[in-house]
Amino acid sequence: MLPFDPQPPLQLTSAAELAQGLAQRVRAMRLLRGWTQLEAAGRAGMSLASYKRFERTGESALLSLLKLALVMDQAEACEALFQPLPWRSLDEALVVRPQRSRAPRRRPSP
């Protein structure tokens, strides 16, 4: 069995709900710092409209979200995303996985 399970576990939370929860936590962090939406947007290099939309809907470009994480000292939390899963058994640890590589580029025909 591989550490990556192609069948995700049953989720009771949607992606939109996760995004909205993240936006609410960012808003709470902004308020704790005493920043206005304009100040948070400026520090992250975002437009005010984009920042407001993020807080309201949870929608944001990935790079904008990562910039927000940096200015709010949350870069380590982003680094922790998508880490390899721990093995569930010794058998999984002993499975030899082939190294994947790209095929060589084809040379154009003369």
Image (cartoon, helix red, strand yellow):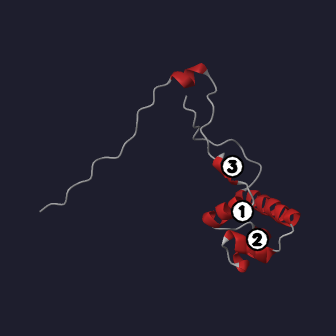
Numbered badge on residue 71: 1
Badge 1 density bin: few <14, some 14–19, many ≥20, Cα 10 Å: some
**Helix, strand or loop under label 2:** helix
Q: Is residue 50 left or right of residue 26?
A: left
Task: Say which quarter of the image contains residue 26.
Answer: bottom right
Q: Which quadrant is the N terminus positioned in? A: top right
Q: Amino acid at mark 1?
A: Val
For the residues labelled 1 and 2, the Cα–Cα distance comes to 8 Å
Of callouts 3 and 2, the N-terminal one: 2
Task: Say which quarter of the image contains residue 3.
Answer: top right
Q: Residue 77: x, y in percent?
A: 70, 49
Query: Going 74% across and 70% down the picture, which residue do you hit?
Result: 54
For the residues labelled 3 and 1, the Cα–Cα distance comes to 12 Å
Question: Is there a contact, CB below 8 Å, between mark 1 and mark 2?
Answer: yes
Q: Which quadrant is the C terminus positioned in? A: bottom left
Which residue, given by chain and number where applicable, does mark 3 sit on?
Answer: 76
Which residue, given by chain and number where applicable, does mark 2 sit on?
Answer: 40
Q: Residue 44: x, y in percent?
A: 69, 69
Q: Is residue 3 left or right of residue 23?
A: left
Q: Amino acid at mark 2?
A: Ala
Badge 3 density bin: few <14, some 14–19, many ≥20, Cα 10 Å: few
Q: Residue 66: x, y in percent?
A: 65, 60
* Position of 3 relative to 60 (above/below): above
Of callouts 1 and 2, the N-terminal one: 2
Q: Residue 10: x, y in percent?
A: 71, 43
Query: Going 40% across and 35% down the picture, which residue do you hit?
Result: 99
For the residues labelled 3 and 2, the Cα–Cα distance comes to 19 Å
* Position of 34 relative to 3 (above/below): below
**Helix, strand or loop under label 1:** helix
